[in-house]
Amino acid sequence: MADVVPVPVEAKPTGTGYTITEDTTINVRDDAAVGTGEYLAELFRPATGYELPIEDGPSRGLNGGISLRLDGAPSDVGKQGYRMQVDPSGVKIRANEPAGLFAGVQTLRQLLPPAIESKTEQSVEWTVSGGYVRDYPRFNYRGAHLDVARHFFGVDAVKQYIDYLAQYKVNHLHLHLTDDQGWRIEIDSWPNLTDEGADSEVGGTPGGYYTKEEYTELVEYAQDRFITVIPEIDMPGHTGAALESYAALNCDGEKRPEDTGVNVGDTSLCIDKEVTYEFVNDVIREVAEMTPGPYLHVGGDEAHTLSDEEYETFMDRAIPMVLEHGKRPIGWHQVLGADPPTETIAQYWYPGQDAPEVAAAAEEGHEIISSPASRAYLDMNYNDQDGVGQDWAGNTSVKDSYTWDPGTFINGVDESSIMGPETALWTEFVETLDDIEYMTFPRLPAIAELGWSPASKTTWQEFKERLAAQGPRWDVLDINYYRSPQVPWSTTASSRRSSATESHG
């Protein structure tokens, strides 16, 4: 049990474990646990070659199989935690809510040999390490952002990303759906947004967008993995694709040219036109209708063409619309300059720790998501040579991504105001799923652990050993990860890029 990421709250090895065989069943007594049982079976069947039937009712015989129950968990594991017992008679996972059972399954897969991740049958003894685990998250909110506007990523790629998040107990996916370079979500009342605003991306290659059906498919796929999708409609800046699609949204009444570059801060919706607010309300309404989760992100950063007064005028109209359509607004922390209602969540992204305006807002009751660019931005390169990202916030090594505390990073902000950490992956220079994987692994698991595990158990020297044990799993999954020399990977681990330039730590 020594190699699990994120590290559990409590794990005690107790000797002999349980071996999954062709006779193993998955026992599910509660209707609400059936989905997790089916997920577990689908996860394990390819590599084991076993049927792993799902049975209802009490376990029978000495081979108790894998038992998933929504009872018998201690109250302190809350809604997302679980208790697991592994002995020769079987695996027992207990939780108070289905999300906890799902988290327990992610731990169970790491207690099996890496070959369990294979899509083809393997000749392996499938023994689960014996022991007891009691586990629950430090932060209820653990997020990951993906920019699909600068470069567009289709449904299959995003589903793959969702699976990566689920594997490390991340439970929110923040999709950056709109920007200067592309509008990626279908809006019935403003069809030109996708007819004209979605057909390109950075570099001028074809872009794309999600139909409402495809977006719903992604949301449901995430829900099945206990991940909440947070859509971001960035405004009033970062709106070039909308300004390209509709002349009326521009102050001069002329469509903006297509944008395939990477500049930021030079676009804005026209603050003085009433049609702007009709547009914003329609978009928020339609996106909210498609999104069962409680949040809608309004962006709000880098509106450099507006005065403070103009920015406040816009947000005074836009943020109440989010609330009126039944969602809780999130904005990049610049939104605090408009003095929004305290229901508004601020996402902190500056690299440093000093942010007096964020500290003051936290004192007033605003909750904060912690995404400092120097630690949590996965588009920052690892070093001067490796990566397909940027370095404006400095290079971010694997050790950098792990050795910070989301609860205390922002000076003057108490942990009680922090919802949790969120990684961000901007895609100006990230073009393929291979690129996504390379910038994500191994930094996403590092930050996922900071969100889940107790601060007292997150030490770099111990973590890098557990992280190294993930490498063989990623090899089986064919993940294109960065083989950082800061991590003692096994000699058989591989990566499709060089890693010789990052310093040891």
Image (cartoon, rainbow, N blue to C red):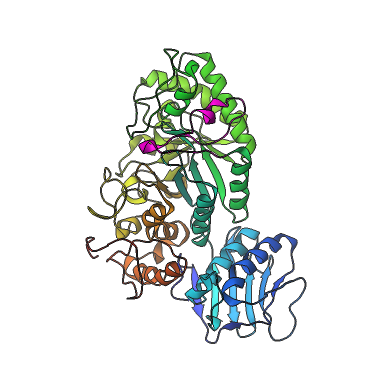
Based on the displayed image, in which of its 4 quarters is residue 401 positioned?
A: bottom left
Residue segment shown in magenta: 183-210
Any magenta on residue 204?
yes
Any magenta on residue 504?
no
Residue projecting furthest to the right: 57
> Chief secondary structure of the magenta span?
loop
- x, y percent for residue 196: 50, 28
From this view, report whether residue 299 is shown above or below residue 465. above
- Which residue appears at 62% of the width and 64% of the height? 101
Based on the displayed image, in which of its 4 quarters is residue 85 positioned?
A: bottom right
From this view, report whether residue 120 is shown above or below residue 17. above
- x, y percent for residue 443: 37, 57
- Which residue appears at 53% of the width and 31% of the height? 194
Left or right, residue 247 beside residue 491: right
From this view, report whether residue 12 is shown above or below residue 334. below
Figure disc tally: 0
- x, y percent for residue 190: 57, 25
Seen from the viewer's position, the closer of residues 111 and 246 is 246
- Which residue appears at 40% of the width and 66% of the height? 457
For the question of whether residue 132 can be seen, the reply is: yes
Placement of the C terminus among the 4 image quadrants: bottom left
Residue projecting furthest to the front: 205
Left or right, residue 472 beside residue 229: left
- x, y percent for residue 215: 59, 42
For the question of whether residue 141 can be seen, the reply is: no
- Which residue appears at 42% of the width and 72% of the height? 472
Seen from the viewer's position, the closer of residues 474 and 343 is 474
Seen from the viewer's position, the closer of residues 97 and 426 is 426
